Amino acid sequence: QLEVIMDRRLMQDDNRGLGQGVQDNKITANIFRLLLERRHGTDVNEEKSSVSFPSLLSHITSAFINHPVIPMTTYADSGVPEMLNTFSPLMSSMPCDMHIVNLRTIQSK
């Protein structure tokens, strides 16, 4: 059983965007996702440590939840120029623990 209690009541501004204290609790819909992983080959030193690090799977899952992929497709017969099909700005593929924040084209004025 897992119980999540969320409450935020402040008498003054917490400098997080509202500009005032929060005293009117509103019911909001929340979606929680749990990622359960088995621990394989745990190290004795790691077992004694109070801090552990997220796995690669948890990094990827977090990236997909916080920054969902927005596919932008074209029709097959739309006549996409060949130049767009061969553009490759990187020498190798991006590491899986990185994601693109913003990608836009440069246009002349």
Image (tube, rainbow, N blue to C red):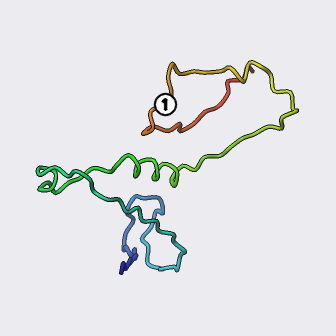
Horizontal side of 45 relative to 54 (left or right) equals left
Quickly name the residue at label 1.
Answer: 94
User: Going 40% across and 52% down the picture, which residue do you hit?
Assistant: 58
| 24 over 89 or under it: above or below | below
| 87 over 35 or under it: above or below | above
- Residue in the foreground of this view, choosing between 78 and 108: 78
Quarter holding residue 1? bottom left
User: Going 32% across and 51% down the picture, which residue do you hit?
Assistant: 54
Q: Residue furthest front?
A: 41
Residue 13, position in %: x, y? 39, 65
- Residue in the foreground of this view, choosing between 76 and 98: 76
| 36 over 99 or under it: above or below | below
Residue 47, position in %: x, y? 15, 56
Quarter holding residue 37? bottom left
Element marked by disc 1: loop
User: Going 42% across and 65% down the picture, which residue do you hit?
Assistant: 34
Horizontal side of 68 relative to 58 (left or right) equals right
Disc 1 crowd, CA 10 A, few/some/many (<14, 14-19, 20+): few
Number of on-image labels: 1
Residue 11, position in %: x, y? 36, 74
- Residue in the foreground of this view, choosing between 29 and 9: 29
The amino acid type, in three-letter code, at marker 1 is Met
Check the picture and name the quadrant holding the C terminus.
top right
Horizontal side of 9 relative to 90 (left or right) equals left
